[in-house]
């Protein structure tokens, strides 16, 4: 009897991950990693909430960047969703969302400097592309019949507002709220490039070995994200959106001459800028591709494949923690807290922490990506499993897990995993900034050397790789007839 297509695809990806593992560097190089890990957990258990005078300001700035960036991205994304059928809009949206927020921040830092506009645009631009895609998918799934009843000549915007939007308002609201949570994570990690959000103070605490201070910041961040449904309400949201632009801070003034120079000189390939001719440009391009782009692509693909399969295995192990078919209320409550912590901690922050504790290798990145994404998928699958009704004589324990629930959930699990494949790829590339030899490492190195022309080419390589993975993921999901929840 031939194996189902979903099983064959799963085995193929598992085999690819095992091959990738052979070529990956997954070692622990720290002299005493367990001691450092113990000190970190001790710091989390003994947080110091009063060590930083600017901690409250950092929390406010983190919230402000998230609200302004996500709010702007949501408005622009909805506008693009109305014309998403245009090929140019789809291509542009795919390109901007394929570039990670930190890459956008590194770009804008070069000409806006440490100005609030850098952080706002770094979040708003990729989120615009994400919102455009998801909003258009949600709007396209509603019943088109009400729009046909409108008077002839009704404009596109009016048609969507009166006939389509009311049918899917709850979905759009839920997804936007989920994106706000993602925006808070994005806002926090902007501090790692110098913007005054939580990541800035978290990096400073770790570099000085102040784990109690770092623990306090992480706890505050978890509480903020976990309580979003309590403080983001229909009546309070407009207040936050109006107040947020005034809480971003002033920053350094923008030097518009730097902006002009960046676009007219800095990103122009050096051979063209120096009038060296086309042969020199060919040599420059060949050197960049062979020595940086291809090694970065290879390591990014290797790390992504290992992290993807590890994410899947962790999600399958994690979903029983919150499923009503396993354990009692106390265990499920603990499971919920555990998974909330995993999915609330940005992969970049997790990787940074583990790199400080274990030393430089691909292992911290694999674990960070798997914990975060596995927590998200495990949470969603666990909630879905709780809605399954079992027979009175259904088996218990491992038999219930392996014979009753996993077979029923496996297609949804695969859909979610393949949906996050492109997201894992984006995060893998950006983790290079921490010293892992993915594409982000070469991008950051080029920026540190003030070689913006090289950095821009490498960022384009990153975007094209993400677009390719996204297309391949959609092909696989379509071939396997998998349905993906848009809120994952």
Image (cartoon, helix red, strand yellow):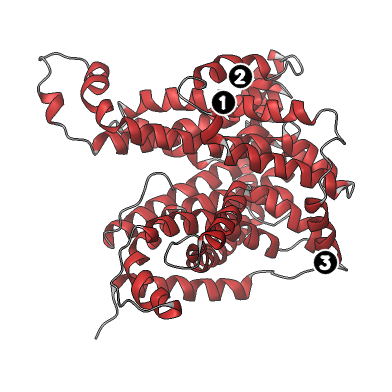
Question: What is the spatial separation of the Cα atoms under label 1 and label 2, in whole angstroms?
Answer: 6 Å
Label 1: state its secondary structure: helix
Q: Is residue 278 in view from this perspective?
A: no
Residue occupying image coordinates x 40% and y 61%:
413
Q: Residue at x 44, y 33 (%)?
A: 176
**Mark 1 or mark 2, earlier in chain:** 1
Determine whether, in the image, residue 302 is placed left or right of residue 422: right
The residue that appears at 56% across and 63% down in the rendered structure is: 307
- Mark with earlier residue (3, 2): 3
Q: Secondary structure at mark 3?
A: helix
Q: Position of residue 111 (x, y in %)?
A: 69, 23
Residue 244 is marked as: 2
9 relative to 54, above or below: below
Pinpoint residue 206: horizontal percent, then vertical percent.
83, 48
In the depicted view, which residue is nearer to us: 212 or 117?
Answer: 212
Asked whether disc 1 touches disc 2, contact meaning CB atoms under 8 Å apart, the reply is yes
- Residue designated by label 1: 67
Left or right of residue 310: residue 467 = left
**Label 3, on which residue?**
33
Asked if residue 215 is positioned above or below residue 173 in the image, the reply reads below
What's the CA distance linking mark 3 and mark 2? 41 Å
Give the x, y percent position of residue 268: 62, 31
**For the point 74% across and 24% down, which residue is it?**
114
Label 3: how many Cα within 10 Å (few below 14, some 14–19, many 20+)? some
Q: Quadrant of the N terminus?
A: bottom left
Apparent side of residue 395 relative to residue 104 in the rendered image (left or right):
left
Q: Nearer the viewer, residue 229 or 131?
A: 229
């Amino acid at each position: 009897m031939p194996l189902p297509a979903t099983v064959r695809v799963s085995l193929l990806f598992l085999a690819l991950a095992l091959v990738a593992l052979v070529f990956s560097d997954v070692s622990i190089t720290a002299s005493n990693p367990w001691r450092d890990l113990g000190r970190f957990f001790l710091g989390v258990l003994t947080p110091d909430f009063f060590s930083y005078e600017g901690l409250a300001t950092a929390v406010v700035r983190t919230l402000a960047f998230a609200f302004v960036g996500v709010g702007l991205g949501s408005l622009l994304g909805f506008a693009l969703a109305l014309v998403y059928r245009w090929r140019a809009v789809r291509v542009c949206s795919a390109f901007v969302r394929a570039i990670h927020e930190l890459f956008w921040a590194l770009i804008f830092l070069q000409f806006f400097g440490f100005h609030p506009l850098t952080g706002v645009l770094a979040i708003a631009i990729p989120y615009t592309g994400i919102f455009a895609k998801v909003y258009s998918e949600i709007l396209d799934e509603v019943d088109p019949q009400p729009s046909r009843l409108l008077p002839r000549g009704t404009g596109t915007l009016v048609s969507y507002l009166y006939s389509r939007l009311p049918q899917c308002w709850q979905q759009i609201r839920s997804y936007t709220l989920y994106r706000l949570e993602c925006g808070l994570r994005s806002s926090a990690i902007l501090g790692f490039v110098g913007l005054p959000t939580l990541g800035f103070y978290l990096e400073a605490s770790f570099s000085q070995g102040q784990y109690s201070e770092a623990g306090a910041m992480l706890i505050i961040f978890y509480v903020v994200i976990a309580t979003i449904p309590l403080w983001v309400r229909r009546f309070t949201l407009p207040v936050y959106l109006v107040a947020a632009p005034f809480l971003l801070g002033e920053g350094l003034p923008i030097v518009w001459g730097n902006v002009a120079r960046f676009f007219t000189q800095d990103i122009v390939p050096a051979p063209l800028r120096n009038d060296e001719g086309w042969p020199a440009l060919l040599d420059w391009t060949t050197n960049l591709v062979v020595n940086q782009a291809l090694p970065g692509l290879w390591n990014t693909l290797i790390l992504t494949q290992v992290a993807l399969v590890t994410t899947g295995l962790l999600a399958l192990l994690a979903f029983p923690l919150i499923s009503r078919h396993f354990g009692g209320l106390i265990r499920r409550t603990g499971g919920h807290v555990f998974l909330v912590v995993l999915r609330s901690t940005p992969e970049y922050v997790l990787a940074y922490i583990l790199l400080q504790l274990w030393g430089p290798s691909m292992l911290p990145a694999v674990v960070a990506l798997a914990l975060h994404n596995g927590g998200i998928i495990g949470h969603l699958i666990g909630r879905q499993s709780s809605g399954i009704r079992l027979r009175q004589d259904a088996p218990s324990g491992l038999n219930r897990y392996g014979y009753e629930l996993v077979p029923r959930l496996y297609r949804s699990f695969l859909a979610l995993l393949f949906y996050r494949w492109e997201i894992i790829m984006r995060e893998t590339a950006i983790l290079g900034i921490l010293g892992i030899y993915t594409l982000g490492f070469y991008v950051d190195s080029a920026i540190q050397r003030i070689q913006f022309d090289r950095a821009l080419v490498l960022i384009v390589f990153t975007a094209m790789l993400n677009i390719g993975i996204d297309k391949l993921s959609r092909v696989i999901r379509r071939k396997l007839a998998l349905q993906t929840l848009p809120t994952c």
